[in-house]
Amino acid sequence: MIKVFAQTDAGKVRSGNEDNFLVGIHTSTFADNLLGILPFDIFTAPLILMVSDGMGGAAAGEVASQIAVETVGRSMNPHVLNTAEALVEQMVEALRSANRAITKRSRQFPEMTGMGATATAAVLYQQHAFLGQIGDSRAYLIRGDQIVQLTKDQSLVNQLVEAGRISEEEARVHPRKNIILQALGSQEALHVATAKLEICRGDYLLLCSDGLSGMLSDDDLLAVIRRNDEVDAACRELVKLANQNGGIDNITVVLAEMSDDNLPEPLPNSQLELEILTDFSNPHLLG
């Protein structure tokens, strides 16, 4: 069994919460956190995890992220055993279904025109995690004393960093750091970035909105997770620290501990091997 907990919080500045999470069939539609740590057997059936950060103002962003997690949750069938290729295809199609559902709602209700949502999703099955990325929410892997960002922000600022035009430090305070290059509901042609990695016993997988990653450094994230014995305590401390550091945005955390005895032990000094399946880039946007 692996252990999972999730929590979302409005933060200290925003009047409402436009974030939502998905853990299997559980969403944050009716509760800001799971009632307790949930166990899952990922050797029996795939498990879908997701964080979605809505945008659009008023209630529209909250609606978009809610549609996103509920649509993806309905579209994934955890009781059907699949090949790796089929799992990735199912995850991508679920995200595209969410894109269509948000677009349809926008057309039905003109006051919601322009709403959208990020999506960082992970399907855990047997010894692998399959990732799907839209926007700038993030996925991290913690292994021992290392933390690795698994996803790339699909943002203008991140492309400036990758092009060598600004530094990572400049990116954290850049005035246009919130401009993302795609979101669910913002365009018909959706380019889902996907990746695959092998997970090991003792690993932690963290999914979060930028309300967390923008308030805490990678070292902060690692320290909190390593010093807490349980995933629920780690999530609560992460949210607390993000609020203490300003809480300028909604904060959402999904944390999974790979505690299953069937998972392999990591090799000493082993390096994480992330296999990029489909990438995302918009180099023309840099001019």
Image: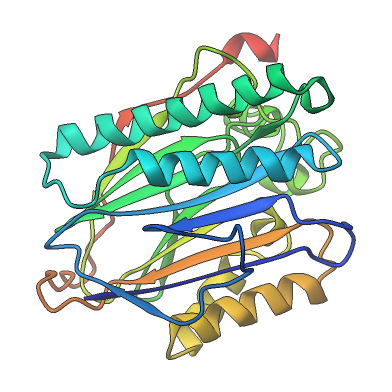
Report if residue 249 is visible in the image.
Answer: yes
Q: How many marks?
A: 0
Q: Relative to 179, is 209 on the left or the right?
A: left
Q: Give the percent coordinates (x, y) of residue 145.
A: 40, 75
* 284 over 129 or under it: above or below: above
Residue 279 or residue 258, whichever sits in front: 258
Image quadrant occupied by the C terminus: top right
Q: Nearer the viewer, residue 116 or 246?
A: 116
Residue 202 or 60: which is nearer the viewer? 60
Tell me the quarter of the picture where residue 21 sits.
bottom right
Residue at the (21%, 76%) spot, across then down: 1
Residue 265 lies, in percent from the top left, at 14, 73
Q: Is residue 110 left or right of residue 232?
A: right
The residue depicted at 18 percent of the width and 73 percent of the height is: 268
Is 197 located above or below residue 127 in the figure?
above
The answer to which image quadrant residue 77 occupies is top left
> In which quadrant of the rendered view does residue 267 lie?
bottom left
The extreme front residue here reads 108
Chosen colour scheme? rainbow
Whole-percent x, y for residue 184 in the image: 58, 29
Near-viewer residue (203 or 28): 28
- The spot of residue 80 in percent (x, y) is 14, 46
Residue 274 visible: no
**Residue at left 74%, top 58%?**
250
| Above or below, comparing residue 240 to residue 127 in the picture | below
- Tell me which residue sits at (15%, 39%) in the image: 84
Q: Is residue 46 left or right of residue 253?
A: left
